[in-house]
Image (cartoon, rainbow, N blue to C red):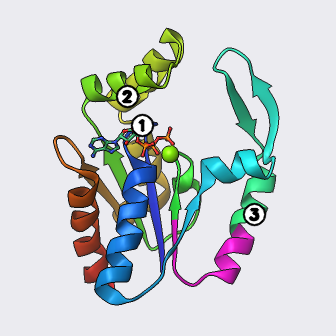
Amino acid sequence: MIIIITGTPATGKTRISNELAKALDRKTGKKFKVLHINTEILRRGLWSSVDKKRKSKNVDMRKLNKFVSEQVKDNQDLIIESHLAHYFKGDVVFVLRANIGELRKRMENRGWNGGKIEENLEAERLNVILGEALDIHGKKCIEIDTYRKTPKSVARTMFRHVERLR
Ligand SMILES: Nc1ncnc2c1ncn2[C@@H]1O[C@H](COP(=O)(O)OP(=O)(O)OP(=O)(O)O)[C@@H](O)[C@H]1O
Ligand SMILES: [Mg+2]
């Protein structure tokens, strides 16, 4: 099974994906590999240029597609997490949502500049990732509100959805 976890930056994808993998292991004995796409992009140089204004990398989607295809071939059970994860095939697509004030605090803690913060908060307000995910995956999408929930409790909710699909 391939589980996709997407959402605006800082909504908790990385933390929650690790919690979900732990819950799946504990409750079903299945070991899901977690593919942290953003980490892999940097580690494997899957980018083509640097965006100076945003202080980020422009992803080389051809290289990234190739890398993800190889992982899918090698792993039966996979969690793919990133704000780009919904560009890949999956059996279920979780779109994490978070409170705007909370997101702003997390982005400030990361030392992001004002422009980058506002751009990302605007994307969350306008449901950009949810809209993209719905266009690509339709009914496979499940929107998950993380407001005032711990990563563990969000992972438990996601686990219950996954159980229904198995
Ligand atoms: N449910 C939560 N409650 C409180 N804090 C959280 C929650 N989820 C994540 N956090 C905290 O918010 C910050 C961002 O989380 P995380 O790095 O998992 O987000 P992300 O969606 O993976 O971001 P990015 O897209 O930039 O990789 C971290 O400091 C994390 O510990
Ligand atoms: Mg992350």
Helix, strand or loop at label 1? It is: loop
Q: Does the magenta stretch include residue 43?
A: no
Of callouts 1 and 3, which one flags the residue occurring earlier in the amino acid sequence? 1
Residue 126 visible in the picture: no
Helix, strand or loop at label 2? It is: helix
Which residue is at 34% across, 64% downward? Answer: 139
Q: Which mark is residue 106?
A: 2
Q: Which amino acid does label 3 sit on?
A: Phe
Which residue is at 67% across, 22% downward? Answer: 55
Query: Which residue matches tag 1?
Result: 10
Label 2, ligand 1: CB separation under 8 Å: yes
Whole-angstrom CA distance, mark 2 to mark 1, is: 6 Å
Helix, strand or loop at label 3? It is: helix
Q: Where is residue 108 in the image (x, y as percent from the top left)?
A: 42, 19
Say which quarter of the image contains residue 85. Answer: bottom right
Q: Which mark is residue 67?
A: 3
